[in-house]
Image (cartoon, helix red, strand yellow):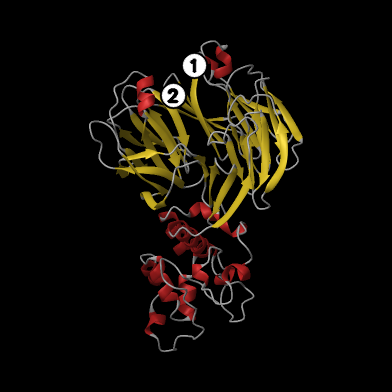
Amino acid sequence: MADCGISGSDIMCESTTAASSGSLLYAVPDDIMQTILQHLRASDLCHVASCCRWLRDATNQDSLWRPLCQSRGWEHYGTTTDLAKIASYGPSEQQATGANEASHCSVTFQNDRIVTDDNTAGLTSTCRWKGVYMRADHLDKNWATNRFHFKQIPFDEEKGRCPDSNTVFVDGDLLAIYTFCKTIQVFDIRKENLQCVIPFIKSAGEIKFKDGVIVVPCFDGMAYACNARTGQTLQTMEGNWGRSIVSLFFDGELVITRVPRCDWINSKKFRDINVWCVKDGQLKCILTADPTDGDYVCYNMDYRDKIVAAAYDDDYIRVWDAKSGKCLHKLKCPGKYSDVKLGDNVIVGFSTKDDTCVSIWSQNTGECQQVIPLANTYCHPQVVNNLILLEPLTELEYQHIGIYLSVHPVKAYNLRGKLVTEVWRKVFEVTGNGSKHPFYLTDQPVEGRLRSSKGVICNATPNGLVPLCNACATNMIWIDDIRMVSYDDEERRLIFHHYW
């Protein structure tokens, strides 16, 4: 059985020969050995593991491999996007590799590289985070070398409108398209067929898709939760937002809604944040600023792991437990804050007016950990895979707000507030999720304008944006950790590149 094949090396078969009893390595205390091993790269650990069983066991520890996953931005491949639970989108392993093909050249990850308890050599099973690292390494190599499984599904919009990044949503093996005819067509990606069609009135906001359930806010003031495979309406949630556009979050259990600020709407509608339970359609709680604080407006909000954070126009960010409705923190902002994002146990506030800055607070204590002053204004803030991304506005956006176009680079900060990437890039307008982000790599601006160069897909990692592979922006409508989806206008078909 094999247990490595990492960082460009060929697969290394594990030795079943025990070290000699007189080996000096046995005299090294375990704590010192672990300290030494913590400084090794993944490829070095694999070489050490191939020496003997004792060293294989010493290197086969989650305490060594999880930090390596974190450093590469791969920790989510063992949690929210668990590759061990995602079947390959290609043929079976035997069909994919053939009798003589080396497993490291196959798109499909060869599961026999992971040592399990039933192995005949009597080896200890591969620890969890080493397995995560091996699978993630294989996935990124597929992206970098353009190895993928190809699938396609015919799709012809009745009124000639092509699907775009604003109308396509993916959850597992299902893809949903909100059509010009005000229906949602759901396709099974593996089976390459139409699963169901869900009729709707016009959507009042972005559709959310999670765990086989689609939630749609509509202009009748209702949010509808539907079974994505059958189209059956499971629950309705009465939001009473009328003809307003709705911001909506959905994690498979809770639905969070907020009406963005509009001058013609009753102010209470865009002060309050509603939390619904999708299982029974009941309103669990209403999150709002303390009435004693005054009649303040919620500018923006974010939701993650049952935590809601909202930025208000009184320059405070309020944080709640979404299940209980309890306010956990009321965070004073050093500037005029208009946006907030949640990261891994942190709250990140963005000031895009006046004195621009980024503030980072501990989610557990509410303590301010870092304030990052910014030289330029009007950035598109994101927190992606624990990386803070600040993207300059497009030329059109600058013209819209009446500000002279001054080109700025994309900046990326880690959660400690350190600038880790600063490059001249323009962002693809592509919907998706995960750590993969497409950009245009550009030269230095000339006369205040960026000159487009080649497209590239980058990994968002704690060490910054890492270029992974070239990409063509033409008709790309979705990207996530394991696939890229585009639309072929001429052939009227959805095209899937599966890298897993």
Q: On screen, 50 above or below 86? A: below
Q: Is residue 43 left or right of residue 124?
A: left
Between disc 1 and disc 2, whose residue precedes? 1
Quadrant holding the C terminus? bottom right
Q: Residue furthest left?
A: 447
Tell me whether the residue at label 1 lies in contact with that at label 2, contact meaning CB atoms closer than 8 angstroms: yes
Label 2, residues with CA under 10 Å away: few <14, some 14-19, many ≥20: many
Query: Residue 431: x, y in percent?
Result: 51, 39
Query: Residue 280: x, y in percent?
Result: 74, 33
Can residue 12 be spotted in the picture? Answer: yes
Quick one: 479 or 253, which is closer to the camera?
479
Residue at the spot of label 1: 296
Q: Is residue 29 left or right of residue 291?
A: left
Residue at the spot of label 2: 316
Q: Is residue 212 left or right of residue 292?
A: right
Tell me the distance, in whole angstroms, between the alpha carbons under discs 1 and 2. 10 Å
Q: On screen, 426 above or below 150? A: above
Q: How many marks?
A: 2
Quick one: 161 or 232, which is closer to the camera?
161
Query: Residue 262: x, y in percent?
Result: 52, 15
Q: Amino acid under label 2?
A: Tyr
Determine the residue positioned at 25% across, 36% down. Answer: 445
Determine the residue positioned at 52% across, 58% down. Answer: 148
Quick one: 176 or 14, which is closer to the camera?
176
Which type of secondary structure does the marked residue at label 2 adopt? strand
Q: Amino acid under label 1?
A: Tyr
Q: Is residue 448 left or right of residue 393?
A: left
Q: On screen, 33 above or below 497? A: below
Quadrant holding the N terminus? bottom right
